[in-house]
Image: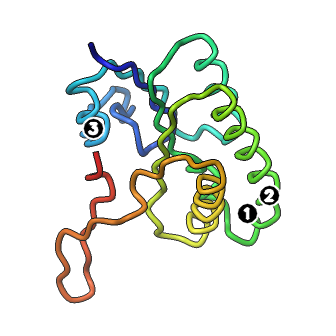
Amino acid sequence: MKKSIALFGGYRFMDLMFNDGKFVNTYNYVLNKLKLNNEVTNYAKLNYSLDKQINLIKNMTKVNNYNEIYLSLGEYESQIEPSNLLLFIKNIKDMLNDLFVYLKNNKINTFVELLPEDSKGVSLINKVVRNLCLKYKITIINDNKYIIKQTGKKVLEFASLYI
């Protein structure tokens, strides 16, 4: 029997993009790998703020009984200038803490994918997410980066090869 899995996030779990008036399929390794042996519902929405994403997670997990959920948190907030992001970091911690308490209380098997650390904003978000995941014993599925090839200063890495 296939497991029922839900994906919540933004661009990290997208498999369709709207470009020039039409939808374009994009290759998503994580989504395709999960779809091989599982029933997957993808709730990924581009530019969805953390509070909207948390409301969606809570509403969909109340209505549907998922075996596992996969989260990519803080994508929208990571685009904020780091100096401005520091003003909202306590609010982000509180929202994520509330989400993780809800997930633990409802015994929802949760996996979190960290964002690729390519800016200070992403580093701040990942630090908060990582600390709360450790506190609530939630699995981070890509904490170890897989370096495929390094040529001089150029490093090719695929953080989604964990599944």
Near mark 2 (Cα within 10 A), the count class, few <14, some 14-19 or many ≥20, is few
Q: Residue at x 25, y 42 (%)?
A: 29
Q: CA distance from mark 3 to mark 1?
A: 30 Å
Q: CA distance from mark 2 to mark 3?
A: 32 Å
Q: Which residue is mark 1?
A: 85
Residue type for callout 3: Thr
88 relative to 145, above or below: above
Q: Which residue is mark 3?
A: 26
- First in residue order: circle 3 vs circle 1: 3
Circles 3 and 1: CB distance less than 8 Å? no
65 relative to 148, above or below: above
Residue type for callout 1: Leu
Label at residue 88: 2
| The C terminus: image quadrant | top left
Relative side of 131 to 23, left or right: right
Near mark 3 (Cα within 10 A), the count class, few <14, some 14-19 or many ≥20, is few
40 relative to 28, above or below: above
Relative side of 33 to 41, left or right: left
User: Please, what secondary structure does the residue beneath circle 2 have?
Assistant: helix
User: Please, what secondary structure does the residue beneath circle 1 have?
Assistant: helix
Residue type for callout 2: Phe
Circles 2 and 1: CB distance less than 8 Å? yes
Q: Residue at x 57, y 41 (%)?
A: 47
Give the number of the mark in front: 2 or 3.
2
- Where does the image place residue 7, in percent across and percent down from the top left? 45, 31
Relative side of 145 to 84, left or right: left
Near mark 1 (Cα within 10 A), the count class, few <14, some 14-19 or many ≥20, is some
Q: CA distance from mark 2 to mark 1?
A: 5 Å
Rendered image coloring scheme: rainbow
- Where does the image place residue 97, in percent across and percent down from the top left? 74, 46
Q: Quadrant of residue 150?
A: bottom left
